[in-house]
Image: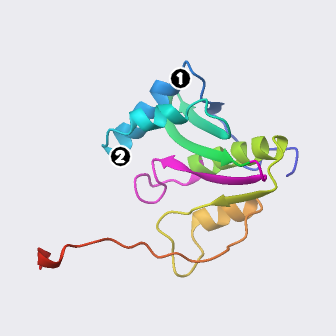
Amino acid sequence: MPAEPLFPTEDVSVERVTPATAREWAGFIDSQYRLPTSPWLLALAGRRGWHHYMLRREDAVAAVRSMFIGADGMAWSGIDAPVPGIMAPSFDLDAMLGEAMVRDGLAAGAKLFVADIEAPRAERDGPAYRNYARLGFKLAYFRSHYSYLPANSG
């Protein structure tokens, strides 16, 4: 990664979640997904291998993302909100979080990073693809999302 930022963070700040901010982080995710996920999210805060991030704009949480780094040096990125392109029109905030996580992951010894891009495009040319390519990611595979409809749902 170059020393200079790939995605300037003007008017925003990226911070790691601490025990003092864990409830705010989990509460933000609850509000974005409208699900009561805080109990299990709080169990991940401070847990070995887990790194959680919040992006703030004007002192309010605007986006979050998490990373897990295993003992083998593999890093997985997920638990993101709002989901760019679905819950939020801009992909910029997620790119800023992604850059902070890759830089921190490299410093922590991560050797391979895996991240999902929500709502994948068959053309593989959207802003999420471009942003993650700037971070050094290569497309590994295309995954379709499935949903279950009960047989009697007509």
Q: Position of residue 135 (x, y in %)?
A: 75, 57
Does dot 1 land on a helix, a strand or a loop? loop
Q: Amino acid at mark 2?
A: Tyr
Does dot 2 land on a helix, a strand or a loop? helix
Q: Residues within 10 Å of mark 1 (few under 14, many from 20)?
A: some
**What residue do we see at 17% from left, 78% from top?**
151
Residue at the farthest top position: 20
Residue at the farthest front position: 71
Q: Is residue 14 above or below residue 19?
A: below
Which range is magenta? 71-92
Q: How many marks?
A: 2
Q: CA distance from mark 1 to mark 2?
A: 19 Å
Q: Nearer the viewer, residue 58 or 24?
A: 24
Q: Is residue 127 left or right of residue 102?
A: left
Q: Position of residue 54 (x, y in %)?
A: 57, 35
- First-in-chain label (1 vs 2): 1
Q: Nearer the viewer, residue 143 or 74?
A: 74
- Residue designated by label 1: 21
Q: Is residue 45 left or right of residue 110?
A: left
Q: Nearer the viewer, residue 87 or 118?
A: 118
| Magenta run includes residue 127 | no
Q: Is residue 35 above or below residue 133?
A: above
Q: Residues within 10 Å of mark 2 (few under 14, many from 20)?
A: few
Q: Nearer the viewer, residue 111 or 124?
A: 111
The tag on residue 134 is none
**What residue do we see at 81% from left, 41% from top?**
108
Q: Is residue 58 above or below residue 100?
A: above
- Residue designated by label 2: 33
Q: Amino acid at mark 1?
A: Thr
**What residue do we see at 65% from left, 46% from top?**
68
